[in-house]
Image (tube, rainbow, N blue to C red):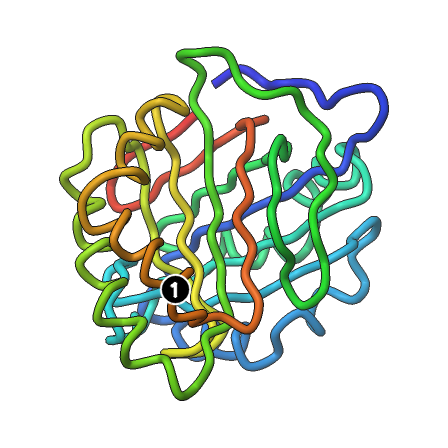
Amino acid sequence: MSMVQPSAHSSQTAVLVLADIAAASRVWGWSRIVKGPSALQAVDGLRFAKVLGSGYEGGFGLRPSGSRQGLFAVFHTAQAAQDFVERSEVLAAYRERCRELCVVELLCWSCRGSWDGTSLDIVSHPPQDQEPIAALTRASIHVRKASAFWQHATPSQNALGDVPGIQLAVGLGEAPFLRQATFTIWDSVAAMDAYARTGPHLQAIQSAGQQQYFSESMFARFILRRIQGQWKDKQYG
């Protein structure tokens, strides 16, 4: 996929890493989640980072995966993001220990809400009609409302596998049950909106608004700057 350049007024760039840790390195993989963002403190140009677990086989259920995980990082500049992807010891360690690795560089064109008090800068114009886009949805769920949330969320998330126009979908999270995220890549905005505004997902959105399930949430949309690697046996880039 060709690279999209950041806009002149800002170049903040996000990087999402999807990793399937090889069997011989599972202890190392679990240690990444335990250490969390502290393991990235020495990375140049880093503004924000989260180390994330995943659902079983990269899905959305409450059963955790023993091998699949993610890393979401936001950099002050596109150059810092590129240096991280191409030259950092962090990514080199993942590459050495993963059965699959997919790295996505992202430019935000829409962001509503925040993640631990951090929102994303708008650095890109909205996409063209048939241009692929990505979306990241994350939420901190009130403990007393978690069971009700999952009753609505599970059918919506499970439906993603059969939705026309979706290229990639993965369930991620900082903590089981209460701090969840979904990352998706779509053929176009129209394909994403068609899913968001119908069926189980629409019902989940309406219920979340009415019942106030979340103490904090963020919904961000991105242009794909670059994607490379493999995820769930599919090659990208």
Q: Who's the residue at 76% across and 20% down the image?
A: 7
Q: Residue furthest left?
A: 162
Q: Is residue 89 above or below residue 63?
A: above
- Image quarter (top left, top right, bottom left or bottom right) of the C terminus: top left
Residue 217 lies left or right of residue 175; in this view the side is: right
- Residue sitting nearer the eye, 22 or 11: 11
Task: Indicate the quadrant where residue 110 lies.
Answer: top right
Q: Who's the residue at 29% across and 57% down the image?
A: 204
Q: What is the tally of numbered marks visible in this picture?
A: 1
Q: Who's the residue at 36% across and 78% down the image?
A: 177
Which amino acid type is marked by label 1? Answer: Gln
Residue 89 lies left or right of residue 159; in this view the side is: right
Q: Who's the residue at 26% across and 46% down the image?
A: 232
Q: What residue did someone put label 1 on?
A: 210
| Residue 96 pos. (x, y %) | 49, 55
Q: Residue furthest top?
A: 129
Q: Is residue 213 above or below residue 106?
A: below
- Residue sitting nearer the eye, 70 or 10: 10
| Residue 13 pos. (x, y %) | 70, 38
Residue 41 lies left or right of residue 197; in this view the side is: right
SS for tag 1?
Answer: helix
- Residue sitting nearer the eye, 178 or 90: 178
| Residue 95 pos. (x, y %) | 50, 51
Residue 3 lies left or right of residue 45; in this view the side is: left
